Image (cartoon, rainbow, N blue to C red):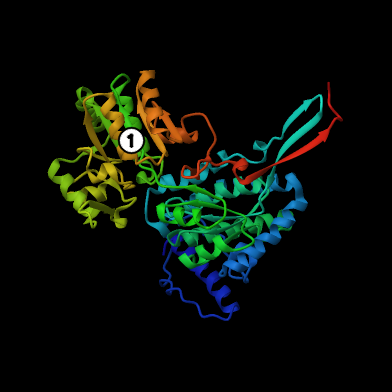
Amino acid sequence: MSTLQLDDQALRAVVEDVMRSLGRSPVLAPAPAPSAPSPGAPARASVGHSVKPGRFGVFEDVNEACVAAAAAYEQLREKGVAGRAKVVELVKEIVTAKAVEWGKYEFEETKIGRLEHKIEKLQIVKLVPGTEWLRPYSLSGDHGITMEERTPFGVVGAVLPVTHSVPTLSGNIINIVAAGNAVVFNPHPGGARSAALAVRTYNEAIHAALGIENLVCTVLKPTLDSFNALTKHPAINILLVTGGPGVVSAAMKSGKRAICAGPGNPPVIVDGTGCLKKAARDVIQGGAYDNNLLCIGEKEVFVLEKYADKFMEGLREAGAAQLNPAQLAKLTAAAFTFSKDAGGCSHAAVNRQLVGADAAVLAKHAGANVAPNTPLLFAETDVDHAFVLEEQMMPMVPVVRVKDMDQAVDYALKAEHGYKHSAIIHSLNVDHMTQMARALDATVFVKNGPCVAGLGLGGEGYLSYSIATTTGEGISNPATFTRTRRCVMVDNLRIY
């Protein structure tokens, strides 16, 4: 048995203990029979067998989680900003120390993406800003002084994606608690065990340091019902949703303020004025990262026609593998299901079994043989191809030839669907950069780098895994989870 299976068995015991204590029978499938761990395997995850209902943030019932988080919020208020800073410090220390262990656990649970990137996404959580981000704004004049400060909402209800369960959870905790709030997570079912593992570990450390037991809560078995209950619970003051169009739409209709990180289909334009080889390397670095699970990842490329051959040569030289038209057709048939609506318009649905799959796996579906470590596939397509128009989250990037910059921008706008999420351009022409920026109005716009530079990885800036595009807050930070409160002193204490 692998270390990850041992962790799963231990967490199963936690769940069963909680269920028995609640008077219910465990419904999880039995764990596989144990066998010897592989040589050199790291230590097992620290999941104990003595968890009681409501202990250390792990709950079966949404109502219990929300009530516990509300009580923890009141305790955090008593600890002040120093208490918040201590939580941020603990989370960053723990997630850095547990990055390899938890990355392997999440990779085993979700079975999508690339292990080395699962680990790296946890190692860089330390780049998420904390309490230092929150600074008051002051005014002074003839009529006194005014100070505007950031104050917490209370309890945040948060939804996690399966693509980055523990990294998103960890980064959100830092932002949310730095702002002075508690949080209840409704994780994606596919990453719920990873979320529970991290939540319990964080709460144990927080309780030991501050005496607060349930500052961070999660639901053991998340469902649509638990999501609906979370959005309606009176203890929840604000929602943070990272997910697809369905869950974002539901959150925005909940009647509560919602910070929503919605879908994206980021286009890339290559105009040939810069280094084509570097542009190719950057597209591979971003588009292949965690098998293209990042919402900001390069999803389709529009390249000016006279530079297209040279650009694709750069892709091949940098390790990407090109599919021919017949291979592309086979992969498309495997990757999408097509249907027509009442008006006769065709619609493509992504095959979830291939989301986050390795490029070599996709190549087999295409009838092609590539090296196991191939980072990315690419193929020439037209602008109406499913790989161009759908957010497919696979390491296969379509390349579309365009006649000029105007056509490139038009095609990019069509592919991006007006999500205003992310866009990338490789160019030394400032007019071209400006043209694309104005047309797409993207939340993240990267020039001459891979998409990950938009989060400070290769560029400047802070990190967050929740990018509120639908509701407009942008890359989330502690201020995102605060209200603005104004304090006014009239005709006194002015300093000049």
Q: Nearer the viewer, residue 195 or 400?
A: 400
Quadrant placement of the N terminus: bottom left
Residue 393 visible in the shown view? yes
Q: Give me the residue at 53% from left, 32% from top.
A: 461
Amino acid type of disc 1? Answer: Leu
The answer to whether 411 is drawn above or below residue 331 in the figure is above
Q: Seen in the image, is 106 located left or right of residue 479?
A: left
Left or right of 391 in this view: 145: right
Q: Quadrant of residue 269?
A: top left
The residue at the far right in this view is 492
- Taking depth in this image into account, of 33 and 290 the one nearest to the observer is 290
Name the residue rendered at 22%, 41% in the picture: 384
Which SS class for mark 1? Answer: helix
**Residue under numbered circle 1:** 413
Q: Position of residue 83 (x, y in %)?
A: 73, 48
Q: Residue 30 falls in which quadrant of the image?
A: bottom left
> Which residue is at a point 64% across and 49% down the rendered structure image?
177
Q: Position of residue 190 (x, y in %)?
A: 42, 60
Residue in the picture at 46% in, 45% down? 470
User: Looking at the picture, does residue 190 appear above or below residue 477?
Assistant: below
Determine if residue 299 is in view: no
Tally of numbered discs: 1
User: Is the residue marked by circle 1 packed among few (<14), some (14-19), or many (20+) residues within 10 Å?
Assistant: many
Q: Position of residue 37 (x, y in %)?
A: 43, 62
